[in-house]
Amino acid sequence: MIAFFRRAPLGALAAALWLAGCASYQGINASSTLTSPQAMGIPGTAAKFETTTDWWKQFGDEQLDKLIAQALEGNPNLKIARARLARAQAVTEVADAATLPQVNGSLDATRQKYSANGLFPPPIAGSTRDSGTLQLNVNWELDFFGKHQAALDSALSAAQAAQADAQAARIMLAANVARSYFQLARINDQLAVARRTLAQRAESLKLVQDRVNAGLDTNLELRQSEGSLPEARQQLEALQEQAVMAQNAIAALTAQGNRQPIATQPTLAGFKPAATPRELPADLLAQRADITAARWRVEAAGKDVVNAKAQFYPNINIVAFAGLNSLGLGRLLNTGSEQWGVGPAVRLPIFDAGRLRANLRGKTADLDVAIESYNAAVLDAIHETADQIASSQSIARQQAEQRDAQAAAEGAYDIAVQRYKVGLGTYLNVLAAETSVLNQRRLGVDLAARALDTQVQLIRAAGGGYRADASAASVAAR
């Protein structure tokens, strides 16, 4: 083999390499650049935020834990993400195979009528004969210019992106189940408020009827009191409809179909608060699966550009074959039927009507798209996390003020009822005080539900327990 290459026309090979310059990729470059954490305002001295991959267990609800486990096991969207990961991993195996020698065998048997006026002389001319070939072929493209390695690196990066996407889908699914569960708890608490309101209005109606019977009030107060009961029942029915729809949403997320997923109705008081960051985490970008996936796509697009540039250089193959060939199948395995050959094959682009440059421009544009998609994902992550931190802190302050406001409203309502009982106030005063109490009760439930929902969204925005391997973390942080 070495002797053969020594005898090969080195001048012809050098000329081939020179001619490759006829197809040039000069002047085609990416125009986008990756943003940095510092440029996005993430302080390097900020505290890190760490949570477990099963962060939902912090809320202390076993039924929620079971629902999320069911969702992670059976949700079709998560299975789609896993299938995409398997496909991306298969592509890496295909790309890896291209870097290795390809070996195949062939067996051909032919019965042929030979022309009497053709290439072959008598006795073959004009006869019908059998011929056969049994051969082993070897083809190995030497990756001098890194084309196959770039394709393999691109496929590996794409597989890493698919793996991060699968983790992002898992985190999003768990967050959606938790949020739907907390929404159901909010509705249940609002139902409790509505039932309490209905009972309270029924008691007020009895009081008004007693006062009308005693001649202390008129039918106007009675009609006002009677009209409040249908309104309370309507609100109760509307909340029950919302509760059914919330349970249907949970059933869909957990792949339960038409089965009832909730055995015990949750309430907001049954949850423990979860740990959340108080400022943007210093390692936010490395903790986000979607950011890691976007960064891996930049890596894959960059390797595609390297591959596209390598297309401008020659393909240098080592081609070899060894086998048996004979005219007449009976002599195929006889001594003398052996044949073999080995040698280089060089293919290079000289004039391709701009195909290679167009392909490189396309891959470079894909790189720009991947870079800007990464930059946009970073901006969205910072925006989302900052918003949730601000909301979490504001809700805590709002809850403190609401508790004071509700206590004052409850006290005012009690005074209005007592004054009405002894004839010192009108029923309109009672209705106004009651309206204030109901608004505060509903607001208290909504704020408690928002606090839980914000905790879930903040945990997800800060990574949701995503754990990248060392290479993925370094790629995401670059």
Image (cartoon, rainbow, N blue to C red):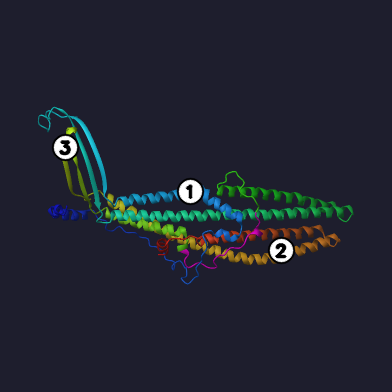
Q: Gap between marks 3 and 1, in whole Å?
A: 58 Å
What is the residue that sits farthest to the right in this orientation? Answer: 214
> Mark 2, residues whose alpha carbon is within 10 Å: few (<14), some, or many (≥20)?
some
Q: Secondary structure at mark 2?
A: helix
Give the quadrant of the C terminus: bottom left
Residue under label 1: 79
- The reply to whether dot 1 and dot 2 touch (C-beta < 8 Å) is no
In-front residue for pair 103/444: 103
Disc 3 marks which amino acid? Asn
- The reply to whether dot 3 and dot 1 touch (C-beta < 8 Å) is no
Query: Residue 3: where, in percent of width, then height?
Result: 14, 54
Q: Which residues are magenta?
A: 266-285
Disc 1 marks which amino acid? Lys
Is residue 274 within the magenta segment? Answer: yes
Tell me the residue at 37%/60% (across/down): 32
- The reply to whether dot 2 and dot 3 touch (C-beta < 8 Å) is no
> Mark 3, residues whose alpha carbon is within 10 Å: few (<14), some, or many (≥20)?
few
Is residue 341 within the magenta segment? Answer: no
Residue under label 3: 334
In-front residue for pair 322/86: 322
Q: Which mark is residue 14?
A: none
Query: N-terminal of the two: label 3 or label 1?
Result: 1
Q: Secondary structure at mark 3?
A: loop
> Mark 1, residues whose alpha carbon is within 10 Å: few (<14), some, or many (≥20)?
some
Give the side of residue 278 with respect to residue 144, left or right.
Answer: right
Residue under label 2: 406
Query: N-terminal of the two: label 1 or label 2?
Result: 1
Q: Gap between marks 1 and 2, in whole Å?
A: 47 Å
